């Protein structure tokens, strides 16, 4: 990638970085992306996909598979702490997971595809909404317009602090954990604080659930039996001294490597809630949010990414354990041969979701180059070309 092209793409990233929008509210970001893609004349441009999703379609000259390259539109509800000239202009919002960089790498492919359409098949550049909540991929898949672009192959990446800048890493099999937020609502009856015996307080059940839930699954080795429960929030009654509480909530995040293990963990946690509530005479309800299925890389897609990375001049570091964090990209693997790779964003880089994180521009050519070789591998009769 020439310095001039990298500078142009860096300007795009900085512009995206300044307008982070949270999941489901990515209107300005989607509009900026769509305007950029139109410059490179896709054969079709879909907007409003699964919310604010954008998909640019580049058709090949002959029949062939559909290859989807996916990135994420959304930022985070975290205040950015930096003095960067392109820092967020949206208070309380920041691109602190690198989605601005992911979008830039996928947008770079539009310029390649304008200059040279694939020899066969078609390429879909998907800018997906609401990844951070896990709602985006299911919404895109459920959108009636998705039937127009249903892929045979799907690829994505995520930058990874802790790996050297530009290092490509791959995991065969499970790549990201399943997770979901469990919201437990406990309902009893309030009473005067002078007569707590005349009410039904959730305090006893909460006292049981806080240690009981974490005891169900305490982490350990990242294998098929891995499970972890993390308490994230608890609430009891009103902030007053005159009322014995009649309502409480406990929030926890459940995390596993496999969907099957998640099913068992949900059953165990639900049974624990019912047992605690029965003992205390409470009614209860359970809701789930931020639901992510396990993300598992397909063997053929892994082999394609491996070959593409080597062709782009980047040695692949194979890893034998998935990431603990979750990704809704796994949804695309239910209908396509899909795989995600990780791209090092620096050994000294602040962690994802830290308020001082910033995506390194130096990895833009690496991610764009790997994706370009994937397209060549699957859709072009000859590989290579200057990127």
Image (cartoon, rainbow, N blue to C red):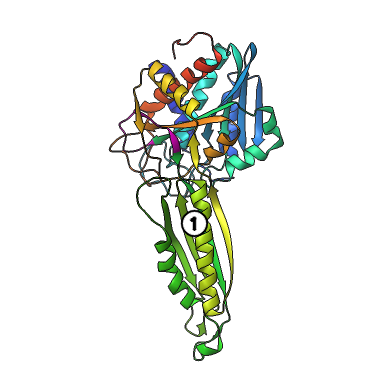
Q: In this picture, which residue range is highlighted in magenta? A: 160-174
- Where 282 falls versus 88 (above or below)? below
Which quadrant does the N terminus fall into?
top left
Residue 62 falls left or right of residue 289: right
User: Circle 1 sits on which residue?
Assistant: 265
Taking the spot 53% from the left edge, 17% from the top edge, the residue there is: 378
Q: Secondary structure at mark 1?
A: helix
Q: Residue at x 53, y 38 (%)?
A: 330
Which of these two is toward me, 302 or 84? Answer: 302
Instruction: Return the x and y of residue 57 as percentages of the image width and height.
Output: 62, 23
- Expressed as whole percent of the image width and height from the top left, the position of residue 244 reads 51, 83
**Residue 142 in which image quadrant:** top right
| Classed neighbour count for the residue bearing mark 1: other residues with Cα under 10 Å, few (<14), some (14–19), many (≥20) | many
Q: Residue 154's x, y, as percent? A: 55, 29
Residue 164 painted magenta: yes
Q: Quadrant of the C terminus?
A: top left
């Amino acid at each position: 990638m020439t310095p001039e092209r990298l500078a142009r793409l860096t300007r795009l990233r900085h512009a995206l970085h300044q307008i982070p929008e949270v999941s489901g509210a990515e209107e300005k970001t989607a509009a900026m992306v769509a305007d950029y893609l139109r410059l490179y004349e896709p054969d079709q441009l879909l907007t409003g996909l699964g919310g604010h999703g954008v998909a640019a379609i580049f058709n090949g000259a002959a029949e062939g598979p559909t290859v989807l390259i996916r990135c994420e539109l959304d930022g985070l509800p975290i205040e950015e702490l930096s003095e960067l000239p392109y820092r967020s202009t949206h208070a309380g919002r920041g691109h602190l997971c690198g989605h601005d960089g992911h979008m830039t790498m996928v947008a770079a492919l539009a310029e390649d595809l304008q200059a040279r359409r694939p020899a066969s098949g078609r390429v879909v550049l998907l800018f997906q909404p609401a990844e951070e909540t896990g709602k985006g991929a299911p919404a895109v898949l459920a959108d009636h317009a998705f039937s127009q672009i249903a892929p045979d192959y799907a690829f994505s990446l995520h930058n990874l602090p802790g790996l050297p800048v530009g290092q490509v890493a791959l995991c065969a099999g499970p790549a990201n954990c399943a997770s979901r937020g469990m919201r437990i609502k406990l309902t009893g009856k309030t009473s005067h604080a002078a007569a707590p015996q005349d009410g039904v307080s959730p305090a006893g059940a909460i006292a049981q659930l806080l240690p009981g839930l974490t005891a169900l699954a305490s982490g350990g080795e990242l294998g098929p039996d891995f499970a972890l429960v993390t308490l994230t929030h608890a609430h009891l009654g009103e902030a007053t001294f005159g009322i014995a509480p009649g309502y409480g909530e406990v929030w926890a995040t459940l995390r596993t490597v496999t969907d099957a293990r998640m099913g068992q963990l949900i059953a165990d946690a639900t049974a624990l809630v019912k047992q605690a509530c029965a003992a205390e005479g409470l009614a209860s309800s359970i809701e789930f949010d931020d639901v992510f299925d396990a993300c598992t890389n397909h063997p053929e897609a892994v082999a394609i990414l491996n070959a593409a990375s080597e062709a782009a001049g980047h040695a692949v570091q194979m890893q034998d354990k998935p990431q603990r964090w979750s990704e809704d990209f796994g949804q695309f693997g239910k209908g396509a041969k899909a795989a995600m790779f990780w791209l090092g964003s620096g050994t000294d880089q602040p962690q994802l979701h830290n308020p001082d994180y910033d995506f390194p521009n130096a990895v833009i050519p690496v991610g764009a180059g790997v994706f370009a070789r994937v397209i060549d591998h699957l859709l072009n009769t000859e590989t290579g070309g200057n990127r």
